[in-house]
Amino acid sequence: MAEKNAEVMEKIVSLCKRRGFIYQGSEIYGGLAGVYDFGPHGVELLNNIKKSWWKANVYDKENYYGLDTGMFRHSRVWEASGHTSGFSDPLAECRECNTRIRVDKELEKAGVTADEKMSEAEINTLFDAHRDAISCPKCGKKDFTPVRAFNLLVKSNLGDFTGEGTEPVYLPGEACQGIYLNFKNVVDSMSPKIPFGMAQIGKAFRNEISPRNFLFRTREFEQADTQYFVRPNENKDAYERIKQERWDWYLSLGIKEEKLRFKQHENLVFYAKDAWDIEYEFPSGFDEIEGIHDRSDYDLTQHMEFSGVDLRYTDPNTGEKYIPWILETSMGLGRVFLAVLANAYHEDEMDGETRVVLKLAKHLAPYRAAVSPLLKNKPELVEKAREVFRMLKKEFGNIAWDDNGNIGKRYRRQDEIGTPACIVIDFDTLGEENPEHKDTVTVRDRDTGTQERVHISELASYLMRA
Ligand code: GAP
């Protein structure tokens, strides 16, 4: 089973490169671990996921405000948030081959749970007690250095022209801090009534010790976050509603419900009221794609204390001042992208051949349709096909032109990209053989392979409906 799953993952990784979804970062220089680039089809799928998320979290709401905040933030931000002191993973190094391991993950593989709040001394004790069970993943030896807490923040030298900067500016360890920093700005400029939310998609950077599983754990990634501000102690109902909304959003992407599950955190940080993850069953097993956190007033209290700026909300009716509590949703776009791909990946038989097909939801597919002339060396077919292509491109934007190879090859290629419909302009379209078919085209459905003749004048509305 594990082998089969690894094989599926390999097939997805290879399809991603072959079909222009994902490339290894800096590949021509040998690659950069934990960094990936989105290719022409990947960026379309990614943007469609983002559009769907933005619609669900901003446009479909009446009281959510969108933001796009700067990536560089004052170094005190990360002190206030606790990232400079507590945002670390336990690291040990193999004395034989210098491979670095993330100790909590290796302990987990050996069936030992390491609590993420453990101190360096505590995790060393736990590691020492189970050293026999842990081998270096590269050389197999069991000789490791002591564990040290390795901070995941990535430093920059922004504004430090002498190299002596004592207060480094970090790249964001998480996107959501930009929302907290602008809480007062949004309240002052938009006068929102509590409860209200803010949403943003932003980059995050973490010096992950062992990036793994393709897009699952990377060093550069994007997060889509919402923060919902409520009156103190008015968190519970809103939290349950948000959990349900997030679950429903994944179903709206076409993700099979049996591939999703909720998992409650067992060990909460001291300020948290509750925390759940939504997990997806990747080929490697169930793992987190989104965290939903009931965080009390911690974030705004910390920033109020560190900045000295009053971040309390004033009730417009009573004048009462208080620090709102926050309900956070934080989703990794790379992980959702991978879940969507794994969910859509199918191999089946069609026209007597095995084919690979991405059964992507239509609103996520990189192209809504592909347009082809039956033969590319017949100018009258090409001209008509170009006309149809231009018309649909004006309407939808994401329409592919495909005249490479024979029709069968084009279908296979578009199936692999997940294009829901292939439109072919043939001699019937020109009215040469069956005058009653003049100005009709064939539309082939990706999932069933069935073909329908549709009049060109109906094509756009057909694609919108289908
Ligand atoms: N502001 C809360 C926060 O950042 P998190 O659990 O550290 O919480 C939220 O991250 C989400 O970001 C995760 O559920 C995951 O989808 C994604 N994520 C975290 N680390 C990641 C990594 N190294 N690579 C890819 N995605 C990651």
Image (cartoon, rainbow, N blue to C red):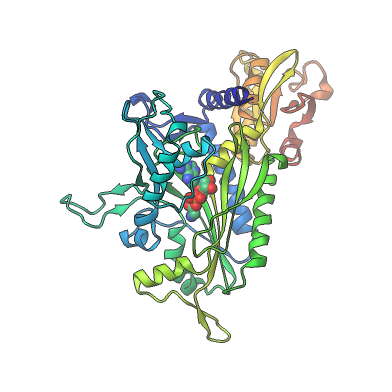
Please give the name of the residue rendered at 62% of the width and 32% of the height, measured from the top-left corner. Answer: 342
Q: Nearer the viewer, residue 133 or 220?
A: 133
Number of marks present in the image shown:
0
User: x and y percent of residue 244 in the render?
Assistant: 69, 55
User: x and y percent of residue 84 in the render?
Assistant: 34, 55
Q: Is residue 55 visible?
A: yes
Most distant residue in the left direction: 162
Please give the name of the residue rendered at 53% of the width and 67% of the height, measured from the top-left corner. Answer: 296
User: x and y percent of residue 59 in the render?
Assistant: 62, 58
User: x and y percent of residue 71 in the render?
Assistant: 38, 53
Determine which quarter of the picture holds residue 400: top right
Most distant residue in the front direction: 129
Q: Is residue 205 visible?
A: no
Left or right, residue 334 beside residue 311: right
Q: Nearer the viewer, residue 281 or 202?
A: 281
Q: Is residue 430 above or below residue 81?
A: above
Please give the name of the residue rendered at 45% of the width and 64% of the height, measured from the top-left corner. Answer: 180
Q: Is residue 408 above or below residue 171?
A: above
Q: Is residue 338 above or below residue 242?
A: above
Left or right, residue 379 beside residue 96: right
Q: Is residue 272 above or below residue 163?
A: below
Determine which quarter of the picture holds residue 129: top left
Q: Nearer the viewer, residue 449 or 329?
A: 329
Q: Nearer the viewer, residue 463 or 68?
A: 68
